[in-house]
Structures are given as structure tokens and as C-alpha cells.
Image (cartoon, rainbow, N blue to C red):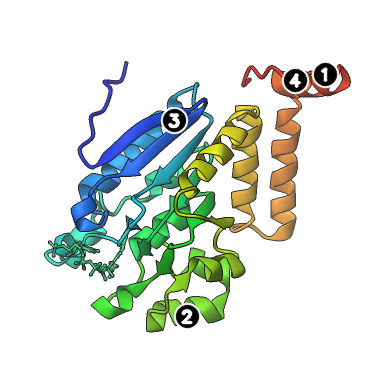
């Protein structure tokens, strides 16, 4: 059995039934992402992903800063070979293997790697003060964790170019207008809104949720024909589950479904 991990830079809670909450907790550095905090985030996500009582994960920072980017002080001493050879900091692919939905609850700064980790989540709830940007160009580098790719797919080339080349920052309302976030709510409400959304997702069949997230994410990767085939395979797969039988029986019998997650 796995030993329960201990964390120094994040707080891990279960604030509502079925919901796993991860809070970045480096307030003095505005939640800058160094190797340790990214490793802790991904380890906590993996633990929630394995936990059968958890149906969805919320990732948040503080009201002032979701995350002000990768830790520039740590990166300043890192050479190209160390960056390329892989470390806790550079292996962000761990997050793309999480099967359960992840909701980013973003307030304040979401810059550089902070914007990128939010975009790697499946949904984003923003507070009115959220600010999204890719300021890497001001450091003589470029976004290295999806900023040129996920951002362009989310907001389109024109806005993405301006953000990556000229350090244009998006307000929460602009992020909503360009389709980067799901909704914008007051600072005192964004986290509860994200938790409520996670709780709603967690009330569904986990196997149906997992295969749905998987299929939607394939829309970014595949051609339409390939994507439609992929969707069909996940659809047929769900016809082999107890939850599919239960969900349809519950509808016909006018009662709430009692999911077994199998
Ligand atoms: N790194 C390290 N420390 C940071 C930081 C950061 N990104 N952002 C803020 N801090 C620290 C400040 O140094 C300061 O610490 P002390 O000086 O007090 O020790 C403290 O947090 C408070 O910051 P400020 O005094 O600057 O606070 P202000 O309110 O005046 O300004 C700010 C807030 C967010 C506008 C400003 O701090 C700022 O511009 N921060 C830097 C934003 C930035 O450039 N972010 C992009 C970093 S590059 C990759 C994965 C990820 C990445 C790349 C590759 N792989 C998987 C390969 C990502 C790269 C980046 O994110």
C-alpha cells in the first residue's frame, strides 16, 4: 500500500462529497511553481485520481495569485541540458494522465506557467480579479508548458500572438469573451463555485465521466473523422458497464441513479 504523501507547499482537502481540493500555498512567492510544488501538485492529483471516493479535483491558489508562473529564481540557474533531461519541474505530462476532471479556480495572477497549468485543467472558473498572461517573452524565453499551443487553440491566433509576443494580459472578462474560462464570479464566490461544479461532476458515474473527458480532449488531437471514431468506441464501451444499465433503469423507474462506478 502507498504511504500517504506529506506536502509542504500545497494544502490538500476534501471540502465536499466526492471533491478533492489542492491549494497552492507559497504565498510569499505568489505561488511561483518550482520543482517541489509542481511535484507535490502532480502527486496529490495522482492520489485523488486513485481514490474511489473522489470524482473531481479542484486546483486553486490564493485570492491574490493562482500562480505567478514558474519560479524564475530557480530557472535562472538552470541550463538547457538540465531542462531537457527531465526533472520534477519539467515533467508536466504527469498531469495529462489524470483521468478525473480537474477544475482550476483562478483568482489574481495566472501568469506564464500559472496560466499554462490552468489551461491544462479541464474547466476554469475565474474570479473577477483573475489576470491571464504569458510574459515569458519579457524574460527572453517563450512559454514552455503549452502557452503557444493550448492558448492558441483556446483564444485563437490573434490574441495568443499578442499575449506571447507583447505580454498582453487578459482580464477575467476578456478571458470569458475569448473562451478561455467557463465563467467569471465574485472573488468571494469563485472557489465555492468551482467546488459546487466539481461536486456536480462527482455525482455522475465516474466511468462515464472519465471516458467523456478522454473523448473531449481527443478533439484537440485528432481529425474529425478520427475523433468521431474515437468517441464511438468510448460510447460503445459504456454499454458494457453496470452504470449504463443503472442510469437508464433509474430514468425509466423515475428514481435517482445509484452508481457503482463499474
Ligand atoms: N518566480 C519567482 N518569484 C516570484 C515570481 C516568479 N515567477 N513571481 C513573483 N515572485 C516573487 C517576487 O520575487 C517577490 O519575492 P521577494 O522579492 O519578496 O522575495 C514576491 O514573489 C512578490 O512579488 P512582487 O514583489 O513582484 O509582487 P508585485 O505584486 O509587485 O508583482 C507580479 C506581482 C506577478 C506582477 C510580479 O511578481 C511578476 O511579474 N512576476 C513574474 C511573472 C512572470 O514573469 N511569470 C512567468 C515566469 S516564466 C515548463 C513549465 C513551465 C514554464 C516553462 C517550462 N516546462 C514543463 C518545460 C513556465 C515558465 C514561466 O512561467
Q: Where residue 201 sits in the image (x, y, percent)?
A: 61, 35
Q: Marks 4/2: CA distance?
A: 48 Å
Question: Residue pushed farthest right?
Answer: 252
- Mark 4 / mark 3, whichever is N-terminal: 3
Q: Position of residue 245 (x, y in %)?
A: 78, 20
Secondary structure beneath dot 3 equals strand
SS class, disc 4: loop
Q: Badge 4 is on which residue?
A: 256
Mark sitting earlier along the chain (1/3): 3
Residue 147 locus on image (x, y percent): 42, 67
What is the number of the mark on residue 249? Answer: 1
Pointer 2 or 3: first along the chain: 3
Between disc 4 and disc 2, whose residue precedes? 2
Tell whether 82 sits left or right of 49: left
Gap in angstroms between the C-alphas marked 1 and 2 = 50 Å
Which residue corresponds to the image point at 38% horizontal and 60% vertical from the top-left? 108
The residue at which mark 2 appears reads as 161
Disc 2 to disc 3, how far (Cα)?
Answer: 38 Å
Residue under the point 61% across and 51% down:
218
Amino acid at each position: 500500500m502507498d504511504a500517504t504523501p506529506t506536502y509542504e507547499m500545497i494544502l490538500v482537502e476534501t471540502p465536499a462529497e466526492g471533491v478533492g481540493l489542492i491549494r497552492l500555498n507559497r504565498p510569499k512567492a505568489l505561488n511561483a511553481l518550482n520543482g517541489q510544488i509542481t511535484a507535490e501538485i502532480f502527486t496529490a492529483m495522482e492520489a485523488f485520481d486513485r481514490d474511489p471516493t473522489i470524482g473531481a479535483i479542484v486546483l486553486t491558489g490564493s485570492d491574490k495569485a493562482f500562480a505567478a508562473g514558474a519560479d524564475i529564481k530557480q530557472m535562472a540557474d538552470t541550463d538547457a541540458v538540465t531542462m531537457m533531461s527531465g526533472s520534477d519541474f519539467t515533467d508536466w505530462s504527469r498531469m495529462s494522465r489524470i483521468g478525473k476532471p480537474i477544475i482550476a479556480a483562478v483568482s489574481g495572477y495566472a501568469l506564464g506557467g500559472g496560466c499554462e497549468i490552468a489551461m491544462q485543467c479541464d474547466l476554469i472558473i475565474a474570479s473577477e480579479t483573475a489576470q491571464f498572461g504569458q510574459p515569458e517573452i519579457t524574460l527572453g524565453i517563450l512559454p514552455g508548458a503549452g502557452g503557444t499551443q493550448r492558448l492558441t487553440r483556446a483564444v485563437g491566433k490573434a490574441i495568443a500572438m499578442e499575449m506571447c509576443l507583447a505580454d498582453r494580459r487578459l482580464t477575467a472578462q476578456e478571458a470569458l469573451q475569448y473562451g478561455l474560462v467557463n465563467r467569471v464570479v465574485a472573488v468571494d464566490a469563485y472557489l465555492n463555485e468551482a467546488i459546487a461544479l466539481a461536486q456536480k461532476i462527482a455525482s455522475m458515474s465516474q466511468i462515464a465521466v472519465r471516458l467523456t473527458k478522454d473523448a473531449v480532449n481527443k478533439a484537440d488531437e485528432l481529425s474529425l473523422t478520427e475523433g468521431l471514431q474515437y468517441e464511438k468506441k468510448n460510447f460503445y464501451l459504456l454499454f458494457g458497464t453496470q452504470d449504463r444499465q443503472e442510469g437508464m433503469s433509474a430514468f425509466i423507474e423515475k428514481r435517482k441513479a445509484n452508481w457503482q462506478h463499474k
